[in-house]
Amino acid sequence: MRLFIATPVNFPLYGAVRQNLSKYIDGKWVEGWNLHLTHKFIGEDEPEKYKVKLKEKASPTRQKFKIKGIGTFGNKVLYLKAKMGDEINKEINEKFSLTNDKPFIPHITLCRIKNIKDKKFWDELKKYENIEFEVPLEVYLYKSTLTKKGPVYEKIYKYE
């Protein structure tokens, strides 16, 4: 089973941002109900190994994190910037003996950009640099099923 650990994100302005920026870029937009912050991509494994309690210090219960701004990874990915500590990510790596092959950059992918049709995109992007809201830190183990229409994510365990 293809697995990852993530926090679901509800972005109230997503439809408006998507509609506006789609005029300037071509790409694969994430479906609104699939928006999430990935703490760790696991890959193919058995879910039972990951159904455990997190330590009290890193327990996500009643915590929140901030979304503050929008950005891009080069010309390839449009994302929301997340501001949060890395306690949960450190614990996930330690508890499940996962390697930390890339530095953790907390973000929520909005669109995988294929083409920037109009350079006005960069000016339009600036309109959203002050987006700010809070998201409850609910951490789940997800199953990811790849389909021709894109990935389908299913929450299979909630970390308390």
Image (cartoon, helix red, strand yellow):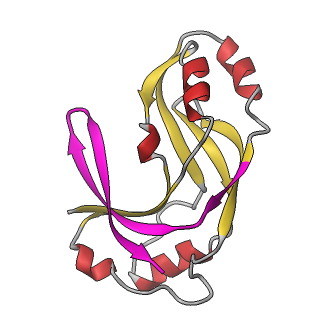
Residue 3 vs 33, above or below: the answer is below
Q: Is residue 101 left or right of residue 119?
A: left
Q: Position of residue 83 (x, y in %)?
A: 70, 58
Residue extending farthest to the top is 118
Helix, strand or loop for the magenta stretch, by majority: strand
Q: Residue at x 32, y 52 (%)?
A: 153
Inspect the magenta stretch and tell me whether residue 136 lies in it: yes
Q: Is residue 72 magenta?
A: no
Q: Residue at x 70, y 26 (%)?
A: 125
Percent x, y of residue 81:
66, 47
Rendered position, 102 above or below 85? above
**For this rendering, which residue is in front, 26 or 17?**
17
- Region rendered in magenta: 133-160
36 relative to 20 in the view: left or right: left
Q: Residue at x 43, y 44 (%)?
A: 33
Please tell me whether residue 103 is drawn above or below residue 91 in the rendered image. above
In the figure, 58 relative to 104: above or below? Answer: below
